[in-house]
Image (cartoon, helix red, strand yellow):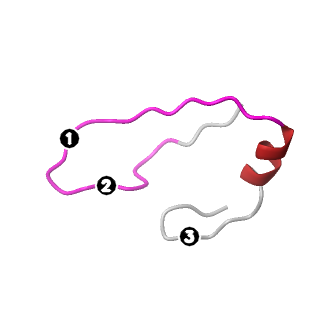
């Protein structure tokens, strides 16, 4: 189980929230856990 909580992409003067849930297989989980460095996400 993994969770990402925070402000990743925001817009000025915009209220609301978004929730995304998805099932993943082993291949997608391996890709998700790969190192990444972008303006909005890094690990």
From which residue to which does the magenta span run?
5-25
Looking at the image, residue 38 lies above or below residue 6: below
Q: Which residue is mark 2?
A: 10
Where residue 12 sits: x, y (%)?
Answer: 19, 57
Where residue 10 sits: x, y (%)?
Answer: 31, 54
The tag earlier along the polypeptide, 2 or 3, is 2
Give the residue drawn at x 82%, y 49%.
30
Is 4 left, or right, of 7 in this rendering?
right
Q: Which residue is mark 1?
A: 15
Label pair 2/3, CB-CB below 8 angstroms: no
What is the distance, in whole Å, between disc 2 and disc 3 at their CAs?
15 Å
Residue extending farthest to the right is 26
Give the residue drawn at x 20%, y 40%.
15
What is the distance, in whole Å, between disc 3 and disc 1 at their CAs?
24 Å
Looking at the image, residue 28 lies above or below residue 10: above
Looking at the image, residue 11 lies above or below residue 6: below
37 within the magenta span: no
The tag earlier along the polypeptide, 2 or 1, is 2
Give the residue drawn at x 67%, y 61%.
43
Q: Which residue is mark 3?
A: 38
Q: Name the chief secondary structure element in magenta.
A: loop
Q: Residues within 10 Å of mark 2 (few under 14, many from 20)?
A: few
């Amino acid at each position: 189980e993994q969770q990402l909580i925070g402000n990743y992409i925001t817009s000025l003067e915009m209220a609301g929230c978004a929730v995304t849930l998805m099932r993943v297989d082993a291949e997608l989980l391996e890709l998700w856990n790969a190192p990444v460095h972008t303006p909005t996400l890094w690990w």
